[in-house]
Image: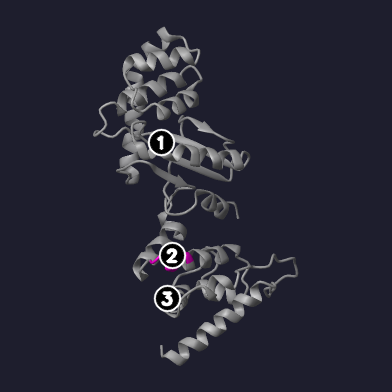
């Protein structure tokens, strides 16, 4: 593509981006169509090289809507009834502005939108918060001794609080061999769950990662009002170990080898992005 042609293409792209801020109806049955909006500033803020890369990606990448066998740019130019196309364009622009190369941006897009990137992760009897029929299910594989997992707790709590009727959060045990107290801590959480206090213990354990002895667990159980004798029995039972091993096996099947690993409706979440933005995309 020559320099003159590139400038013309960029100008055309800017024109239809601007048109979309007003709203364009698609051909088809007469019905209200929500305007697709992409602020022109998203394009203006790019360098000439970045604009060229964005154009290439939008032309190359397929629409995220399964029933739209067109590219992202065609989907938006023709105002196809697929609001996710606009979201996809935003993500492509962000990838380029974040300094990703072409292949990196393509991989990031596929991770976010390719239907083959969706994993089936059954909730089973795992601890969960939120309605079972929620539009968005977040699954986390975590190790109670992982410092990075501890940092995800307030992030996920915030999303749950902001979307009480639309998000379900499911926790999966994944103690790593590198953490000697990882598996015992997971059993302590499971034992507390047997008395209906999993989430209370979950937060206590993440807040006190350096205090994870058996005596510490018993103290936490007592502070939470649990039957300590029953807690100790469950903590030491083979049932708890088997339950944790079940989640570890599932993690291996899904391809999870590090924690935290978070999935949003089966897609592995990219921690470089906002978790709330991923939830918002899935709600559309």
Label 1–label 2 contact, CB within 8 A: no
Regarding mark 2 in the picture, which secondary structure is present there? helix
Mark 1, residues whose alpha carbon is within 10 Å: few (<14), some, or many (≥20)? Answer: many
| Residue 36 located left or right of residue 206 | right
- Figure check: 17 above or below 110: below
| Residue 162 located left or right of residue 179 | right
Regarding mark 3 in the picture, which secondary structure is present there? helix
Q: Earlier in the sequence, mark 1 or mark 3?
A: 3
Residue 97, position in %: x, y?
Answer: 44, 67
> Which residue position holds label 2?
95
Label 1–label 3 contact, CB within 8 A: no
Which one is in front, 69 or 130? 130
Magenta portion: prevailing SS class: helix
> Which residue position holds label 1?
150
Residue range (magenta):
94-99
Label 2–label 3 contact, CB within 8 A: no
Question: Which residue is at 68% across, 74% downward?
Answer: 24
Mark 2, residues whose alpha carbon is within 10 Å: few (<14), some, or many (≥20)? Answer: some
Regarding mark 1 in the picture, which secondary structure is present there? helix
Q: Earlier in the sequence, mark 1 or mark 2?
A: 2
């Amino acid at each position: 593509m020559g320099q003159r042609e590139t400038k013309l293409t960029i100008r055309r792209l800017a024109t239809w981006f601007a048109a979309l801020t007003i709203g364009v109806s698609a051909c088809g049955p007469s019905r209200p169509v929500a305007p697709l909006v992409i602020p022109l500033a998203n394009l203006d803020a790019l360098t000439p090289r970045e604009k060229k890369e964005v154009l290439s990606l939008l032309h190359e990448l397929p629409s995220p809507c399964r029933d739209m066998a067109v590219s992202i740019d065609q989907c938006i130019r023709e105002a196809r009834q697929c609001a996710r196309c606009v979201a996809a364009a935003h993500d492509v622009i962000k990838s380029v502005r974040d300094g990703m190369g072409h292949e990196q941006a393509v991989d990031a897009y596929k991770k976010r939108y390719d239907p083959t990137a969706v994993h089936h992760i059954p909730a089973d009897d795992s601890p969960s918060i939120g309605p079972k029929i929620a539009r968005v299910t977040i699954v986390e594989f975590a190790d109670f001794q992982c410092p990075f997992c501890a940092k995800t707790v307030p992030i996920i709590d915030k999303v749950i609080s902001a979307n009480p009727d639309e998000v379900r959060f499911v926790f999966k045990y994944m103690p790593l061999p590198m953490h000697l107290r990882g598996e015992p801590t997971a059993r302590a959480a499971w034992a507390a769950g047997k008395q209906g206090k999993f989430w209370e213990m979950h937060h206590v354990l993440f807040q006190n990662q350096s205090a994870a002895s058996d005596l510490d667990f018993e103290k936490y159980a007592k502070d939470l009002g649990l039957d300590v004798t029953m807690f100790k029995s469950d903590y030491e039972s083979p049932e708890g170990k088997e339950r944790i091993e079940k989640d570890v096996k599932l993690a291996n099947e899904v391809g999870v080898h590090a924690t935290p690993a978070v999935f949003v409706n089966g897609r592995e979440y990219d921690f470089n992005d906002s978790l709330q933005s991923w939830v918002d995309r899935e709600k559309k």
